[in-house]
Each structure stands twice: as structure tokens, then as C-alpha cells.
Image: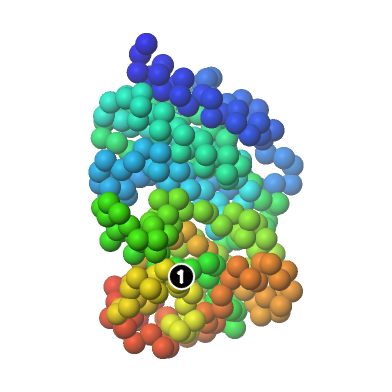
Amino acid sequence: MGEFELIRQIFMPLAGQSGSAALLLGPGDDCAIQRVPPGQDLVFSIDTLVEGIHFPHHYDAEKLGWRALAVAVSDLAAMGADPRCFTLALTLPEARREWLEAFARGLGSAAGAFGIVLAGGDTTRGPLTLSLQVHGTVPAGTALLRSGAQAGDLVCVSGTVGDAGLALTYLDDPDPSADAAAVLKRYHFPMPRLELGRRLRGFASAAIDVSDGLLADLGHILQASGVGARIDGALVPLSEALCRLSDHGRLRAAVTAGDDYELAVTIPEHRWRALADDVREQLTVVGSVTTEQGLVIINGDDVQGATGFDHFGDV
Ligand code: ADP
Ligand code: MG
């Protein structure tokens, strides 16, 4: 059996997994066919992960499968989109059945968890690299953009930030403590905030997923919206595990580290009050949008001079 036949055997089964009506034709033909229901906008994005740059060399194949899809789907969450289907361009140095099966297991569990199906892909030989294009839909005109933040809006962040960044310290730890295991889970198995993104349609004025660090990603919203923000370092949500594991400089690390895949959003105050309680509970207000450009952090002494912070003096 040829290696590409092996790959098809392994990936084709993922295609039918959630039997999505959105996908009229999956892998196997020259193209896939997706039907976009009338009144919906198609929202799509592509992400590439290169071994040694976006994930460590010899990274576990099953974790890689989950992580690659989670990272790509997180962009759909940030747009408030419902996931539909994805394509996978896989470049591999060699086709080893064991590796491919583990990778497909991770990818398949993520696809099931996020409600997205594999529509097709491409397979080539070379240094390990993955590109995933994800497709989602939103009711026409309701996608959450980076550009809608207005002075006075609240700046909110979901969940907690900093765990995945701290996890990098423990990647090679053979016997991690319970706290280290908790932050490692955030790195290996990110959970894109799909349900939250969807529920913020019609409420958030701007949104982004936190992939490069809260400061850098919030900076993208501010830049795209032509506004500034004032945030309170004491309000930035940190997990209990992170607080126990790190002390000095932890706020700085938490706001400059990436890979958490939480959402950073701005919400006008009257809409914040109109949000359902269970949505508000997933968010922490950390500050507000200002007409003055730039990002000011109060109660964030250890953040001054942090990479990513200096950058904002001249936003
Ligand atoms: P073509 O030469 O027409 O591009 P390919 O041999 O690249 O055809 O692909 C044949 C079929 O297998 C296509 O439908 C494609 O979507 C699917 N396919 C190839 N590689 C993958 C992959 N890694 N994951 C999912 N589907 C794949
Ligand atoms: Mg091809």
C-alpha cells in the first residue's frame, strides 16, 4: 500500500464523523462542496504549524492533532462563528502508521468536540508542517471584528491567562505536580471559546483570541479600532495553579505569554448589563476603552518594560 493510500485510509474516516449537513461532498473528489445556508456569511481562516517553531520537535502526535485543530478553530470562536468544516495540508518526512493513527485520534477527538468535519486536504513529503483551513458560518453581518471597539466600552477577558505560557517550563518534566499538570493541560489541549464567541454576537463590539499574549492581542483590537485602553493589572484573571507555581513577575509573564486561546473582547456597558448571567460569568472586566491611543496599565508595576508592553507606547 502506498503511503498516500495509508494517509487516506486514516483521514477519510474523520470526514463523516459528525454527519454535518453543511458538507455536501467530503474528501475523495477533486474538491469538497460546502453548502452555505441562505442568510449566512462564510467565515474562514488558515493556520500553519511548523515543527520546532510552533510545537516542539518530537511532540506527541495525538496532542499535535488536537492542538493544531484547536488553534485554527479558535479564530472561528473569535469571530463568533459556528464551525462547519476544515481542510488539512499535511507535510510529513515519512508516513508511519503509528504516528498517523495517533495524530488522527487527536484530530478526530478535537473535531468531535468542536463540531467540525474534515472536508479534504493535501499530503506531501517534507519537514513536518501542518496547515489547517477552517470554515465557519455566522448569520449575515454578525461576525465579531477587531475594529469595532469604542471609547467607554468595557475590556473583558475570558477564563484565565498565562497558564499555557507557564506550561513551557514544564514540557520536559517527567513527573509534574498537580499544578504543573493543570497548566500543561492548557498548553496541550486548548479549548477554543466557541460557545462564548457565539453568545457574544450582537453584544461584543470587538473580539480577538489570545494567541500571542493578552497585551499584544488587545493591542490588535485597539489598533484596528483606532482607540486606546486602560487596564488594571490587579484584575487580570490568573488561575490558582499559576498563582501557586509562580510568584515574582507572574503578571508580566501572564499578559505577555501566548497559547491560552481565551477571548479578549470589548463590550459597551449597556450590552454588558443585558448579557445572560452565564455568559458574564465566563468573562472578567479588566478595564475600559479610551479615546487616547495606547494601552495604560495600572497596578502592573512588573509589567512596565515587558516585551509587548513597550510596543504600546506608540500604538
Ligand atoms: P489532487 O491531485 O486532485 O489534488 P490528491 O491526491 O491531493 O488529489 O487528493 C485526493 C483526495 O484526497 C482529495 O479529495 C483530498 O481532499 C483528499 N486528501 C488528500 N490528503 C488529505 C489529507 N491529509 N486529509 C484529508 N483529505 C486528504
Ligand atoms: Mg492535492
Q: Residue at x 58, y 71 (%)?
A: 283
Q: Which quadrant does the C terminus fall into?
A: bottom left
Question: For mark 1, does the 10 Å Cα neighbourhood hold few (<14), some (14 to 19), or many (20 or more) residues?
Answer: some
Residue 99 in sight: yes
Residue sitting at x 66%, y 51%: 138
Task: Tell whether 161 sits left or right of 159.
Answer: left
**Residue 103 location (% of width, % of height):** 41, 34
The colouring scheme, among rainbow, by chain, secondary structure or one colour, is rainbow
- Disc 1, ligand 1: is the CB inside 8 Å? no
For residue 33, say whether it is visible. no
Along the line of sight, which residue is nearer the eye, 126 or 112?
112
Say which of 225 and 46 sits in front. 46
User: Which kind of residue does numbered mark 1 sit on?
Assistant: Ser
Q: Secondary structure at mark 1?
A: loop
x then y, percent, for residue 233: 43, 82
Q: Where's residue 59, x and y in %?
A: 31, 43
Query: What's the residue at 61%, 59% (across, down)?
Result: 197
Q: Is residue 229 above or below residue 91?
A: below
Query: Taking 18 as reference, is 302 left or right?
Result: left
205 lies above or below 164 = below
Percent across and percent down for residue 170 are 29, 58
Residue at (40% x, 33% y) in the render: 102
Quadrant of the rendered image containing residue 301: bottom left
Report which quarter residue 169 is drawn in: bottom left
Find disc 1 in the rendering and name its residue: 239
- The number of callouts visible is 1
